[in-house]
Image: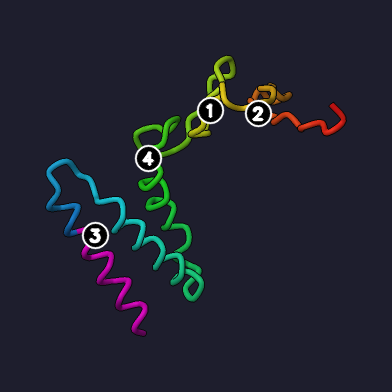
């Protein structure tokens, strides 16, 4: 099948790029592109789906709150971690902690009655 051969070439290219890298890193955009194709391919070959987890973790490893392997770390329950790019000062609402200790921002609802 042509798709399967393309996937094999894509993975070989990623391995070659990784081997050639001095710091064991891959370029983000080509890896995103490879993931997109492999997700598409997993619809035809669902048995490859579990193997995509490594690519997902690698792509998300730059995000805050991740360990060196890309897995999410438990959040510190006392200090909320804001995921918004927008400063909290500019937003109206409340920061509340739920029963599990997770923080949620609840935006204020504009009251047209005043």
N-terminal of the pair, mark 3 or mark 2, is 3
- Whether the residues at callouts 3 and 2 have beta carbons within 8 Å, the answer is no
| Total labels drawn | 4
Query: Who is closer to the viewer here, 102 or 88?
Result: 88
Q: Which residue is mark 2?
A: 105
In space, the residues marked 1 and 4 are separated at their CA atoms by 17 Å
Q: Secondary structure at mark 4?
A: loop
Q: Residues within 10 Å of mark 1 (few under 14, many from 20)?
A: few
- Whether the residues at callouts 2 and 4 have beta carbons within 8 Å, the answer is no
Please tell me the numbered disc located at residue 14. Answer: 3
Q: Which residue is mark 4?
A: 61
Q: Look at discs 2 and 4 and give the one toward the viewer.
A: 2
N-terminal of the pair, mark 3 or mark 1, is 3
In space, the residues marked 3 and 1 are separated at their CA atoms by 33 Å
At x 81%, y 31%, the residue is 111
- Whether the residues at callouts 2 and 1 have beta carbons within 8 Å, the answer is yes
At x 36%, y 57%, the residue is 32
Residue 49 horizontal side relative to residue 31, left or right: right
Q: Residues within 10 Å of mark 3 (few under 14, many from 20)?
A: some
Quadrant where the N terminus sits is bottom left
Q: Read off the magenta span.
A: 1-15
Q: Look at discs 1 and 4 and give the one toward the viewer.
A: 1
Q: Secondary structure at mark 3?
A: helix
Q: Which residue is mark 1?
A: 82
Q: Position of residue 41 (x, y in %)?
A: 44, 72
Colour logic:
rainbow
N-terminal of the pair, mark 2 or mark 4, is 4
N-terminal of the pair, mark 2 or mark 1, is 1
Which image quadrant is residue 77 in? top right
């Amino acid at each position: 099948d042509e798709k399967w051969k393309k996937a094999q070439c894509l993975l070989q290219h990623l391995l070659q790029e990784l081997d050639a890298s001095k710091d064991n890193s891959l370029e983000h955009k080509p890896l995103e592109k490879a993931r997109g194709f492999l997700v598409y391919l997993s619809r035809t070959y669902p048995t490859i789906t579990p193997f995509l987890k490594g690519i997902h973790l690698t792509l998300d490893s730059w995000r805050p709150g991740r360990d060196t392997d890309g897995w999410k770390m438990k959040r510190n329950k006392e200090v909320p971690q804001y995921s918004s790019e927008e400063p909290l000062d500019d937003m109206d609402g409340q920061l509340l902690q739920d029963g599990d200790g997770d923080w949620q921002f609840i935006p204020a609802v504009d009251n047209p009655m005043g």
